[in-house]
Each structure stands twice: as structure tokens, then as C-alpha cells.
Image (cartoon, grey):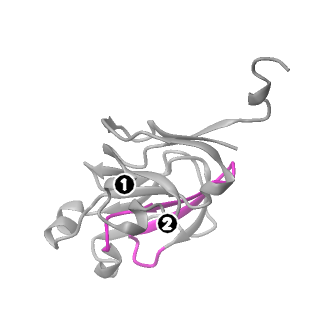
Amino acid sequence: MGLFDFMKGKKELSLGAPVKGECIPIGEVADPTFADEILGKGMAIRPSDGRVYAPADGKISTVFPTGHAVGLTTADGAELLIHVGLDTVQLKGKHFQALVQADQQVKKGDLLLEADLEAIRGEGYDTVIPMIICNSDEFSDIKCKTEGTADIGEQVMTYSK
């Protein structure tokens, strides 16, 4: 067996930052559904901007009617959830505008939704943005950037199939 045979067939895949901001570990998100990885493994970003972009090429699987979250299935089969803020579903769509719809094909860097972060914070909500791989068990070696800042599209997660 060659030294690198264990890597045969394994492909490292990556996701870009959906927003510009400060990367934090998912365990620091003040919501146990995300922090305890109930929905899957991932990371979070404290956004400096309310524009949310596609972290990879794929197909929109879900757009929540309230515009606060979007589901995206990447070309390599990762089922992502990008959730803007905590408990923001209670805003019933106020301060959010979804710019995509279910079944739409998107490219990495396409604008998915816009949120008025100042207004959301003004109503008392945390604007942290978790990005979760909901089918994490189908991937190995999921690594997330958990400190420093990220620009839109900058690699913040890697995983193998």
C-alpha cells in the first residue's frame, strides 16, 4: 500500500463564507439547536453586512417564507442551511428579502437574500449567521474556520466525501 493510498477517492470540498464578518465556533451560538450540532456540523459568522451569498454552486432546496433562512444543496450533495439570526422567524419576514426561490440553480457568489441587520438588532435579535451541513454524517473531516474574519466567498469550511 502506497503512502497516500488512504486518500484515493477522497475529494476535499469547500464552502465559501456566505457573508462578510467574524468567524466563530458553532458552539458559541446562543441557540442549542445550532450550538449542540442538532441540525448538523457547521460554523457561524457575526456579519458585518446583511447580504447573504451562495457559498458554493448548487440548487436552492428551500427558501423560508419569512426570508430569514435558505437551504442549498451543493453540486457535491451537501445539504446546507444558512440561517440569518437567532429566533428571527418571529419577525415574520420583516427586515428580510429573499432574492431566490426553491429549485433555482445558483453559482457560488450569487446573492441569495438581504437582511437589515441594524433593524433586526434594534428589535433585540442576535444577527449571528450559522451555516450548517445538515447531512454531515455523509461527509468526513469537516473542518471550519472558527476565528478571524472572512470575506464573501473566502473558504470557511472543508469536508470530504
Q: Is residue 146 above or below residue 122?
A: above
Q: Residue furthest right?
A: 1
Span highlighted in magenta in the image: 64-87
Residue that badge 2 annotates: 38
Q: Position of residue 6 (x, y in %)?
A: 76, 29
Q: Is residue 50 left or right of residue 123?
A: right
The numbered mark at residue 117 is none
Q: Image quarter for residue 125? A: bottom left
Dot 1 corresponds to which residue? 27
Between the residue at mark 1 and the residue at mark 2, the CA separation in whole angstroms equals: 11 Å
Question: Residue 113 appears in which quarter of the rendering?
Answer: bottom left
> Which residue appears at 70% of the width and 44% of the height?
161
Q: Residues within 10 Å of mark 2 (few under 14, many from 20)?
A: few
**Residue type, label 2:** Ile
Quadrant (top left/top right/bottom left/bottom right) for the N terminus = top right
Which residue is depicted at the point 40% across and 72% down?
Answer: 67
Mark before the other along the chain sequence, 1 or 2: 1
Q: Residues within 10 Å of mark 1 (few under 14, many from 20)?
A: some
